[in-house]
């Protein structure tokens, strides 16, 4: 019995990998805002201003700020962003 050359060799991953959803910058801002409010008790806009100013100090605040900062790419483009 031969192998089917049209079979997808990665078909088994379809059941394992989560669905990828795209968000625009407006939706990204909402995601960042919710995270900033939950973790730091400030708005997303205030977080961005304070992050850009380097205003997060203290170990616990810095860790929480780093977690929120991971969402910045959903809010503003990066140099290699093609959106």
Image (cartoon, helix red, strand yellow):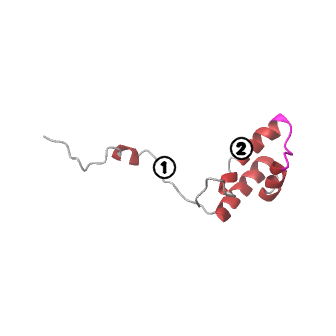
Q: CA distance from mark 2 to mark 1?
A: 21 Å
Q: Residue at x 81, y 50 (%)?
A: 52
Q: Quadrant of the N terminus?
A: top left
Q: Which residue is mark 2?
A: 67
Q: Is residue 56 left or right of residue 25?
A: right
Answer with the quarter of the image where residue 48 lies: bottom right
**Residue 32 appears at what percent x and percent y?**
71, 55
28 above or below 69? below
Q: Nearer the viewer, residue 82 or 7?
A: 82
**Residue 79 appears at what percent x and percent y?**
65, 53
Answer with the quarter of the image where residue 63 lies: top right
User: Secondary structure beneath disc 2?
Assistant: helix
Q: Residue at x 82, y 40 (%)?
A: 61
Q: Nearer the viewer, residue 30 or 52?
A: 52
User: Secondary structure beneath disc 1?
Assistant: loop
10 above or below 24? above
> Is residue 18 one of those drawn in magenta?
no
Q: Majority secondary structure of the magenta segment?
A: loop
43 above or below 57? below
> Is residue 55 one of those drawn in magenta?
yes
Range of magenta residues: 53-59
Q: Nearer the viewer, residue 7 or 42?
A: 7
Q: Is residue 60 left or right of residue 14?
A: right
Q: Furthest residue to the front?
A: 79
Q: Which residue is mark 1?
A: 18
């Amino acid at each position: 019995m031969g192998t089917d050359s049209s079979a997808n060799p990665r078909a088994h991953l379809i059941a394992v990998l989560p669905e990828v959803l795209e968000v625009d910058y407006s939706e990204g801002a909402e995601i960042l805002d919710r995270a900033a409010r939950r973790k730091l008790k400030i708005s997303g806009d205030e977080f961005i201003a304070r992050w850009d100013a380097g205003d997060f100090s203290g170990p616990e605040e810095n860790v929480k700020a780093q977690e929120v900062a991971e969402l910045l790419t959903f809010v503003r483009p990066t140099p290699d962003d093609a959106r």
